Image (tube, rainbow, N blue to C red):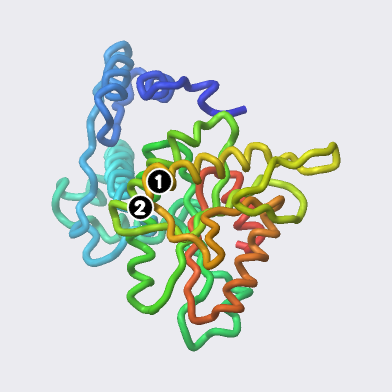
Amino acid sequence: MIIWKFLGNTLGEIAGEKAGIFKKGVPAYTAPQPEEAMVALKRRASELGISLQVVDPLKPHQLKDQHLGLQGEHQYENAGLAVALASTWLEKQGHVDRMPLNHTDPLPDQFIRGLSSASLQGRAQIVPDSQVNSEEKDRDSSLVFYLDGAHSPESMEICARWFSHATKEQSQTCSKSRKILLFNCMSVRDPMRLLPHLVDTATQNGVHFDLALFVPNQSQHNKLGSKASAPAGPEQIDLSWQLSLQAVWEKLLHDDNKGSNSTDSGETSLVFESLPLAIEWLRKNAVEDPSTSYQVLVTGSLHLIGDVLRLLKK
C-alpha cells in the first residue's frame, strides 16, 4: 500500500497523522514546518496538553570542522532535531553532564561522532560503480550513481539541489561529464508534479540533464527510443507507465526548452524494459568513453533505489 493512502493528501492531513506519535505527559519536538503542517501539530499538542518545541537547524560550526554523515543541507534540520531528542533523553536519565551546554556552542564529542558517522542507504548516497571503475584506479570514477529516494515535489527540490552541489564538486576534477536521470515512480504519483520540480531546481543550480532513462522496477531486456510506441501483445512487458513518464519528460523539455542537452543521436530520453539492461547500457557507454564522467541521478522511488543498490551489490 502507498503511504499517502493512510496519511492523507495534504501537508495538514499528513502532519495530523504523524502527530499520532505524540503522547500525553511527554514533550514533543519538531523541525521547522510549513504553516499548514505546524497548525496540525500544534492542534494535536494542545489536545494532549503537552509542549511542542520547534528546534532550530544545527549550525556547521557546532561540528568542530567535521561533516554530517548524511549529505544535503536539509540534514542540518534533522541533526538539530536529533540533538534535541538525545539531550532530552540524557536529561531524563540524569546525565546532564553529557548534554550540550546550549544551542549555539560546539557539541560534545560523543554527539559529533554520532552525527558524522550516521548513514542511511538511498538518501543522498553516492556510489561509484566498482565494475566500471575497478581498472581505473589512477583517475576519477567514470560511472557514479547518486541515489536519493525522493518521491514528493518538496523532496525532489532537495534532491536536485544536493545532486547539483555533489556533481559540481566532482566536476572540478574531471574535464567532461554527462548527467543522466534514472527515474521511476509509482503510478499513484503525479509525474507532472514531480519532474518539473526536479528539472527547475536543477536548472536554477546550473545543472542540465543530458538524458533521462525510465525503467520499471522489474522487467525483461530491451530498449525503446524517444519516439517508440507502447508495446502490444500479451507477452510484451507493460511499459505504458514508463512511456507516460517519458512523454511528460519530453513535453517538459519541449515547453521549457531546458533541462537536457540530449545524446549525440538527438535523443533526450530512453525507456528500458528492465533496470539491469539500463545499468548494462550505462556501463557499456562509460567503458567506451572513459574520458567522460557519467553522473547518474537515481530518484523517484525507494523501490528503484533498492533495486539499483542490489545490482551494484551495495
In the rendered image, residue 276, in percent from the top left (x then y), is placed at 69, 58
**Residue drawn at (24%, 57%), measured in percent from left and top?**
108
- 313 to 32, vertically: above or below: below
- Asked if residue 94 shows in the view, the reply is no
Between 128 and 49, the one lying in front of the other is 128
- 228 to 146, vertically: above or below: above
In the rendered image, residue 185, in percent from the top left (x then y), is placed at 56, 40
Of all residues shown, which one is farthest toward the bottom? 138
- Asked if residue 127 shows in the view, the reply is yes
**Residue drawn at (27%, 19%), measured in percent from left and top?**
39
In the image: residue 143, left or right of residue 281: left
Label 2 sits on what residue type? Ala
In the rendered image, residue 155, in percent from the top left (x then y), is placed at 40, 41
In the image: residue 39, left or right of residue 104: right
At label 1, counting other C-alpha atoms closer than 10 Å, the crowd grade (few under 14, some 14-19, many 20 or more) is many
Q: Secondary structure at mark 1?
A: helix
Tags 1 and 2 touching, CB below 8 Å = yes
At label 2, counting other C-alpha atoms closer than 10 Å, the crowd grade (few under 14, some 14-19, many 20 or more) is many
Residue 198 has which mark? 1
Between 231 and 151, the one lying in front of the other is 231
Q: Quick one: quadrant of the N terminus?
A: top right
Between 216 and 241, the one lying in front of the other is 241
- 206 to 19, vertically: above or below: below
Between 251 and 171, the one lying in front of the other is 251
**Residue drawn at (46%, 20%), measured in percent from left and top?**
8
In the rendered image, residue 73, in percent from the top left (x then y), is placed at 29, 52
Label 1 sits on what residue type? Leu
Residue under circle 2?
202
